[in-house]
Image: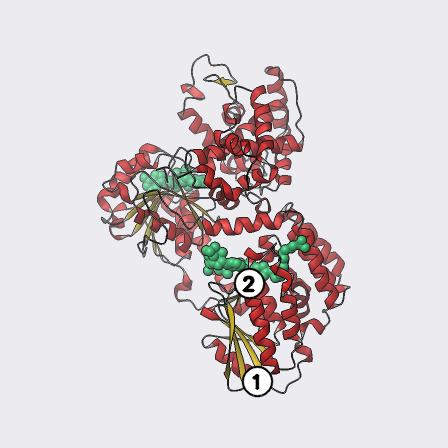
């Protein structure tokens, strides 16, 4: 962890060296300032270049050090001010990334040269913070308030070509970035530096700046629901308008301290490290992420081009993997082709915006459309995404057994069926695995990788690595009905149904959970996914429809409370968005704008009268507690059953697949924050009053952890003991 210095001609090249990403730890900062001050005093040095070792400039402050005393001892602000005020020209040579404090460091240099492949950005907002080493003050002075605000509030990693256009960079090169920076340093020798010191420059005025900033606040409130960091970012940038530079930097410090006191940065930083942690999978048999090499996937196939399949094809193609896309007949194939092509067109547009038009074949893998399974004889990996029907899936896997080459991997995108049962019909159960994508599959970051009993370590490694190649966060889970995410959703939606029965309306429930921070309330989510999906499953399970037990009480099944509300909606043809009606009404079938529907209110009021249910209108807190604690309780059961290896895995799943607000860390982190004794007592009270709702009976593991006072989440794993054979 040191900065080293060498002399090239009369230019001192200071290299940041702190693998893997040259994060600005305390010792690195100390070393940078020493080397820099020495170089600026050294009479043989005429200019200085700052660069990073191992092809990366710097990923910013060392997040692991936040909250510790060393953070401020040698502050990045002090380094930046020293660099900016240096009388010798200072050039940043950016390779790989210049993010957060890394870009702030580069902004304090007088010039910036970057490699064309590099990314720059101020992504602090993504870890619940604001750029607090002058970034909110220097960037607007360099590129103007609108462009700076966009980058800072969204935390976008900006490609070098775009950064050049924005004016963040002075030069972009294809190779030899450090040499180019040295040349730049020599070229500018003797030129005045006053207008290169961003902290001394004025901010360019824009018309109607107040309206502009008010709109930004409104947009951020709507988009980031309860997250404080985006609002603090706007506040910090706004300060450039009325505070001198140094006061603006001081304001960054005040805003950071205030954000820290909300607990949101800690939650988001936990989420950041959890995402990296889940990639380091292990199995009880000694399988380990860094010990089992994945097989390369050069070609892939997707069977079924419906909602999921078309997104999966796009995702593979985006990763430059050639794909064979299969449908059951020419008509479906044609529809699938059109849908995939439309999605790929959008990807090409995005690549163009990133200046990547020159990539051969637009940087996308080719897609071949066919109805012939026989075409799959030579692909490396096949993902099945046909209807959620065990018989159909088995039929396909049986055929794949004889068609696919012996070492091909067979994956199923089932959202909850038994992966072992599917694998059992093949001649290679060790190469069968669940790859559970989330809708829309080309956008959602989560991939649940479901390990069957016979799935080999190589197959796990390959599926996990494929997830990374696709830009997703892959989480290894065990095989049980509905796996992790959907299994936990069951009790959550059960509470939604009970709340509706008791007197809440869909829009009230959605509002409470959207206020909590969910991207979408549960009723809108059910409408989007299609109410008929659950209905068909309940019919198959004999809970409703012709298979239901004759004479069963309407609101009970097998001695447990049951809500027939969603069945009744489906029986009247209300399947959600696809039919234009569900818990809401939409402008048309397939429409997306949800409006409260008086029909639903009448229906619910009538239902309560029919069943003599006295109306209880739950407030937001009750709605949030009942739904969240039901979800969390099932999370504890998932851990007990070793279906997920730790609470971090569950949190990553919810943050990336279910629109859970990241500023709350994830459902299990939220539970730890609320306090496990409180979660336990709320569940106990509910459970006592409602013994016919077993899902709310507190899980054993929750009791166990609450009994020892609710330890911090990082200690839960020790209480879990060794993971069982499910993982
Ligand atoms: C850099 C990446 C894009 C690389 O991605 P990839 O190649 O995919 O690799 P990863 O697996 O993600 O990462 C590899 C490895 O590196 C670790 N790592 C990455 N970045 C950091 C980092 N910044 N710090 C520490 N470690 C990092 C990562 O965990 C992996 O290791 P492993 O976990 O062991 O596997 C990608 O990693 C990325 O995007 N990184 C994050 C970039 C980022 O967010 N940067 C901004 C950092 S914040 C910052 O710079 C803030 C500043 O502006 C500095 C001001 C200082 C403000 C002081 C705040 C004090 C707070 C306390 C307030 C107290 C208040 C009071 O009480 O007064
Ligand atoms: N819709 C969702 O949000 C999610 C669905 N899933 C799962 O993904 C799978 C697919 O779901 P959807 O895409 O929603 O279904 P869908 O109904 O939209 O698409 C299924 C497609 O499979 C095709 N198909 C059926 N039989 C076929 C055959 N023999 N050969 C080739 N193609 C065939 C159909 O023509 C149809 O286009 C299911 O297992 C589902 O549970 C998983 C995650 C989310």
Quarter of image, res 45: bottom right
44 or 95, which is in the foreground? 44
Is 112 placed left or right of 646 in the picture? right
Instruction: Report the Cα–Cα distance between label 1 and label 2.
Output: 26 Å
On the image, numbered disc 1 is attached to which residue? Answer: 45
On the image, numbered disc 2 is attached to which residue? Answer: 25
Crowding at mark 1 (Cα within 10 Å: few <14, some 14-19, many 20+): some
637 or 575, which is in the foreground? 637
Secondary structure at badge 1 equals: loop
Secondary structure at badge 2 equals: loop
* Image spot of residue 59 (x, y percent): 53, 63
Crowding at mark 2 (Cα within 10 Å: few <14, some 14-19, many 20+): many
* Image spot of residue 714 (x, y percent): 51, 44
Number of marks in the image?
2
* Image spot of residue 195 (x, y percent): 68, 78
Quarter of image, res 514: top right
Label 2 CB less than 8 angstroms from ligand 1: yes
Mark 2 or mark 1, which is nearer the start of the sequence?
Answer: 2
Query: Residue at (42%, 34%) from the top-left corner?
Result: 482
The label number, if any, that marks residue 713 in the structure image: none
- Quadrant containing ligand 2: top left
* Image spot of residue 311 (x, y percent): 43, 48
């Amino acid at each position: 962890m040191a900065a080293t210095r060498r002399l090239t001609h009369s230019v001192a090249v200071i290299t940041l060296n702190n693998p893997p990403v040259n994060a600005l730890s305390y010792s690195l900062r100390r070393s940078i300032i020493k080397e820099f001050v020495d170089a600026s005093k050294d009479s043989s040095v005429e200019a200085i270049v700052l660069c990073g070792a191992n092809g990366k400039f710097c990923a910013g402050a060392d997040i692991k050090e936040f909250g510790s005393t060393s953070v401020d001892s040698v502050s990045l602000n002090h380094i930046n001010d020293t660099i900016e005020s240096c009388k010798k020209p200072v050039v940043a040579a950016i390779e790989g990334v210049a993010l957060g404090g890394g870009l702030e460091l580069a902004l304090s240099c007088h010039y910036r040269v970057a490699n064309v492949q590099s990314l720059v950005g101020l992504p602090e907002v993504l870890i619940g913070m604001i750029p607090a080493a002058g970034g909110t003050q220097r960037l607007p002075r360099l590129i103007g308030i609108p462009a700076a605000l966009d980058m800072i509030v969204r935390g976008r990693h900006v490609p070098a070509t775009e950064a050049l256009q924005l004016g963040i960079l002075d030069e972009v090169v294809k190779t030899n970035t450090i040499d180019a920076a040295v040349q730049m340093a020599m070229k500018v020798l003797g030129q005045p530096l006053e207008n290169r010191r961003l902290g001394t420059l004025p901010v360019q005025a824009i018309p109607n700046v107040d309206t502009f900033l008010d709109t930004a606040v409104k947009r951020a409130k709507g988009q980031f629901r309860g997250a404080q960091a985006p609002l603090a970012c706007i506040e910090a940038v706004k300060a450039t308008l009325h505070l001198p530079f140094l006061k603006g930097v001081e304001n960054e410090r005040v805003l950071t301290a205030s954000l820290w006191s909300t607990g949101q940065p800690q939650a988001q930083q936990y989420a950041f490290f959890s995402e990296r942690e889940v990639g380091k999978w292990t199995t009880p048999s000694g399988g380990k992420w860094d010990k089992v090499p994945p097989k390369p996937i050069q070609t892939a196939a997707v069977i079924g081009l419906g909602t999921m399949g078309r997104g999966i094809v796009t995702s593979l193609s985006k990763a430059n993997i050639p794909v064979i896309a299969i449908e059951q007949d020419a008509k479906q194939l044609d529809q699938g082709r059109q849908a995939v092509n439309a999605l790929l067109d959008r990807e090409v547009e995005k690549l163009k915006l990133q200046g990547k038009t020159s990539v051969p074949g637009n940087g996308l893998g080719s897609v071949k459309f066919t109805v012939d399974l026989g075409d799959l004889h030579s692909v490396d990996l096949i993902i099945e995404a046909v209807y959620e029907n065990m018989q159909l899936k088995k039929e396909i896997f049986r055929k794949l057994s004889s068609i696919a080459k012996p070492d091909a991997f067979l994956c199923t995108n089932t959202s909850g069926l038994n992966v072992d049962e599917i694998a059992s019909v093949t001649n290679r159960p060790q190469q069968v695995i669940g790859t559970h994508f989330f809708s829309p599959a080309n956008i959602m970051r989560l991939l649940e990788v479901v390990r069957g009993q016979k799935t080999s370590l190589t197959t796990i490694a390959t599926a996990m690595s494929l997830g990374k190649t696709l830009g997703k966060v892959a989480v290894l889970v065990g095989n049980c009905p509905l796996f992790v995410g959907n299994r936990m959703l069951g009790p959550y939606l059960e509470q939604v149904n009970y709340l509706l029965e008791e007197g809440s309306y869909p829009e009230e429930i959605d509002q409470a959970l959207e206020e909590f921070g969910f991207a979408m309330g549960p009723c809108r989510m059910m409408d989007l996914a299609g109410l008929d999906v659950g209905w068909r499953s309940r019919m198959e399970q004999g809970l409703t429809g012709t298979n239901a037990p004759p004479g069963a009480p309407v609101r009970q099944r097998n001695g447990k409370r049951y809500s027939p509300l969603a069945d009744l909606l489906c029986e009247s043809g209300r399947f959600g968005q696809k039919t234009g009606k569900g818990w809401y009404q939409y402008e048309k079938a397939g429409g997306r704008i949800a409006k409260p529907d008086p029909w639903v209110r009448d229906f619910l009021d009538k239902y309560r009268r029919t069943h003599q249910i006295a109306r209880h209108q739950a407030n937001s807190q009750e709605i949030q507690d009942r739904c969240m604690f039901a979800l969390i309780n099932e999370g504890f059961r998932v851990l007990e059953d070793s279906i997920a290896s730790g609470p971090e895995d569950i949190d990553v799943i919810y943050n990336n697949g279910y629109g859970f607000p990241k500023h709350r860390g994830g459902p299990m982190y939220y539970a730890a924050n609320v306090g496990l004794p409180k979660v336990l007592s709320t569940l106990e009270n509910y459970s006592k009053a409602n013994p016919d709702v077993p899902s709310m009976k507190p899980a054993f593991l929750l009791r166990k952890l609450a009994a020892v006072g609710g330890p911090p989440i990082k200690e839960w794993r020790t209480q879990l003991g060794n993971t069982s054979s499910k993982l």
